[in-house]
Each structure stands twice: as C-alpha cells, then as structure tokens.
Amino acid sequence: MVLTTIGLSLCYYKVTRLGLPLLPTEQADVWAVEARIEFKAHRETPIKAQFYIPRGPAGFTVVDENFVSSSYGLTTEDDGLHRAAQWAVRQSSGYQVLYYRIHLARDPALGSGPANLDPPSWTPPKFSDLIRPAVNAVLEEARSKSADTLSFARAVLMRLNAQTPDANVSLLRQDADTPTEWTRRMVNILLGGNIPARLAYLLPLKDGVKHGELVSWIQVYDGSQWQTLNPQTGEPGLPRDAIVWHVGDSPVLEVTGGRFIKLTFSVSKHTQEMTLIAEQRARKMGSRIMEFSLFSLPVQTQNVYKVLLLVPVGAFLIVLLRNVIGFKTFGTFMPILIALAFRETKLVWGVALFSLVVAMGLVIRFYLEYLKLLLVPRLASVLTIVILLMAAISLISYKLGIDRGVSVALFPMVIMAMTIERMSLVWEELGPLEAMHQGLGSLIVAVLGYLLMSSELLGHLSFVFPELLLVVLAATLLLGRYTGYRLTELWRFRAALKDP
C-alpha cells in the first residue's frame, strides 16, 4: 500500500504540476517567432541596439530562445517587469541585421504572467487648454455610466471609439494618425481620469506571417491586477493567439548609431512532443524532481534506461504467468532476456533463430552425453558450441544476403547455453514431451514479454514515470504471497472439483 501510494502520488504530481503527458503521442502546438532588426550603421560610430523581449508570456511556456548577433556583443537585462536585449559593437558599416528567436508552447497552467505586478506610480498628464475641456467632458460622462475602475475605463474607450463621434471626441482624435498614437492618447486620457493605465504591445500569433508588426493595446490596473483591454472595443482579455511583447511607453526598439531602422516579425507554427515541452517547463520552474529525473542523464544513458526500466514489467509478467496461470519455463529470467533480444531481431526472425539455435545445440548436447563429461566442462562446451552456432548462422545468412540472420548475435549466449543444458536434462529425466512442453512455454512467455515490452505506452510510462515501478513492485510482492491453485491446476483437476 505504501509503495503504491508513493508511486501514484509522484505520478499525479508530475502530471498535474509539471504537465508531463500520460500518453506518448500527445503533442502541442509550438509557435516559432523571429524578430528581425534591420538598420544602416553610421560610419565610425559605436552602435547600440536595445530591444525589449517577452518576459514569460502569460499562458505560454518558453521552449527555446536564442539570439543571432554576428560580431555584436550581447547582454540581457531583467528588472522584474521588463526584459531587454542589448547589442553593442564599437563600429560597423553598411546594413546590419540582428535576429531574436523564441519558441512558445501554449500552457493553460500559466494563466498569469509577470506583467501583472504592482502598479507603478504615475503623473497625470497635462493637457492643453484647447483639449482639456473635451477630456473632462468625456471622463465625466463615462464616470456617470460606470461603477468601478474597470467599467470606467471601458466606458471611456467606448466613448472615444464611438462610430458617430461628437465634437469633443473629434477634437481628441485630431493628429492621432496611427493606431499606436491613438492608443497612447487614450492611455493619457485614462491617466487624466486617475485610472492607472499603460500601453501594451501585442504580437498576434498567426501561422505564416512574414512581415508582422506589434499591435498596441491598453492595460488598466483595477486595484488588484492589470487588466488588458481592447483599445477599440473596450473588451477585456487578450486575443486567443497573442502574447504581450512589451508594456510601457518606452519604444520596443531603440538604436543609436544607426538609421533606417526597421523591425519585423515572422511567425510559424509546428507541433512538438508534449514530453519535451513539459520537461523544459519544469526546468524553468526549478523543479527538483525534474532535476533528478532520468531526463538529466546523457542521451546515450537515457536510451539504455528506456530498455532496462521495462525489465521489471517483463519480470512481473513472468511472475503472473508462472504463479497464477501455471506456465512452465526454463529459468525465471531466460524468457525476459530472450524477449529483449526479440526487440532487436524482431519477432518472426527472433523466434526462428532462437528455435534453430536451441534445436542444433540440443542435438550436439546429446552427442556430448556420450563423452561422460563433468558438469563444468560440459557447460563450457555447450557455451562454446552455442557461440560457434551463432557465428555460423551469422556468416551463412550474411553470405545469402539475409541481413536479419546476423542479428542472432544479439541473443544472450550464456542464457542460451543454460537453456540447452536444462532442456537436455529434462529430456533425459522426464521425457521429450515434458522438455518440449517447457521449451514451448518458455518461447510463448518470451513472445508475450516481447509484445509487452514493445508497447510504446509502457515504454513512455516507465521512462517518464519510473516511480510507477513501485506499483509493479507492490503487485509483485502481493503475488509473492499467493499460495492458491494455478489456473492450469484448476483445469487439470476440474473433474475432481466437479465431484466433491
């Protein structure tokens, strides 16, 4: 019970908190965003480029991030609200191109991002005598039709974006030639009404975009957190596929020592395994469990454990088939090791090669019986014969162009030798029928073990959630206490059970 509880609890934590998937086929959409900065450098002038970059976008996990800056020196700064990359070079000439790339995966567990911090202090803007009355008129009308900060802000935005603007709104719209200028003016009007507001730059995530631009949005502090509002409609919330790239009045890109500055974004979408995304997310969370997981091992070692962790599952199958069903096999681990070899030779060829080696080895083993050898020399002789048989099969199959035959070398030769020895002993003591019975039982169990350990789902669960092996161990211990009849015994004694 304790082992099962520990194993299932760790698995539950990994699924719910770290987001590791239970199914190996789960994939998630990953957005690849590339920001391209282009400008022409002044001659013999130091160049500095400051570019604000996302800081943990809400609802997304940063899968990967990199910079392409050629000969430029690169530093990044993070003040808790803003994050910026700074490129610098002593001098350069001609057109310069810098790249910033980020890969984002949607993560519903990350609903709030670092943008929702305490509101900064602000100074109410000073309006000219010409537009101050218009601002006050708009604010007073919106205040009378609102109940709190958020509804007040929404009323102001709806009033300013009315399809039939009155004289006050028409006056406020003058000289706001671009959407960003108009949004910045609306932010100032909100600040004039003592509403904490700021400009936000959004990047819409749309697959196939090559020359995208940031979209200006508005954020309002409602007393507990920042609320994002559509500057055109006043609707709260972000568009579904969009991230907040930067907040504040400071420009997203500033370049000194350059001209003809141009910033464009390209966006593409692809799918990636959910396991890799969850692993990256857990590492960014600083999870100690993930730090000491199998993912922290070298890839080559990971591949080894992907096989080894399936052995306990196969061993549990042996326990179940022998103690509950009543299968007879040669040894406990022989079918499992043969099943592991089947993973490399594939099932049909594995069964054929295994049967061939055992049959030929058995014939030669009977011949050795006439020599009256002692036990150890006899086992060494059988082992030598098995290796020679495997080598001969590999050579002959290779010369015949049968590549699969070469894979016979993957069989565990010691186990094969012991199987031949034990099968010959059973043959002599209990007869050929019992020997064939146990040999066939071993082969059937090996095939079932191969089918079980070839399961992609079990391979995924055993590697990503190795703690589930504690549940397997608990079940094995439970079966170890089983002393009842086996199913084959019930079938054998069915007549006695019917006639008490």
Image (tube, helix red, strand yellow):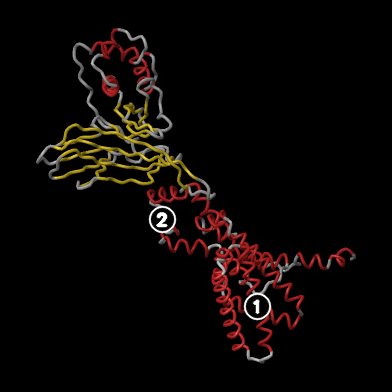
Among all residues in the image, which is located at the extreme right?
499
Q: Residue furthest top?
A: 167
Question: Quadrant where the N terminus lies?
Answer: bottom right
Q: Residue at x 77, y 80 (%)?
A: 431
The location of residue 433, given as percent across then percent down, is 77, 75
Instruction: Determine which quarter of the picture holds residue 337.
Output: bottom right
Report crowding for label 2: few under 14, some 14 to 19, many 20 or more residues within 10 A (C-alpha): few
- The crowd level at tag 1 (other Cα within 10 Å; few <14, some 14-19, many 20+) is some
Q: Residue tagged by mark 1?
A: 360
State the residue at coordinates (23%, 34%): 253
**Residue that carries the numbered disc 2 in the rendered image:** 288
Q: Quadrant of the C terminus?
A: bottom right
Q: Amino acid at mark 1?
A: Met
- In the rendered image, residue 105, in percent from the top left (x then y), is placed at 42, 42
Task: Tell me how far mark 2 sits from mark 1, CA to CA.
Answer: 54 Å
Q: 341 or 25: which is nearer to us?
A: 341
Q: Nearest the camera: 157 or 23?
A: 23
Front-most of 475 and 241? 241
Residue 111: percent from left, percent from top: 42, 37
Residue with the most extreme front position: 400
Left or right, residue 228 beside residue 27: left
Describe residue 123's horizontal placement relative to residue 301 as left or right. Answer: left
Residue at x-position 37% and y-position 34%: 243
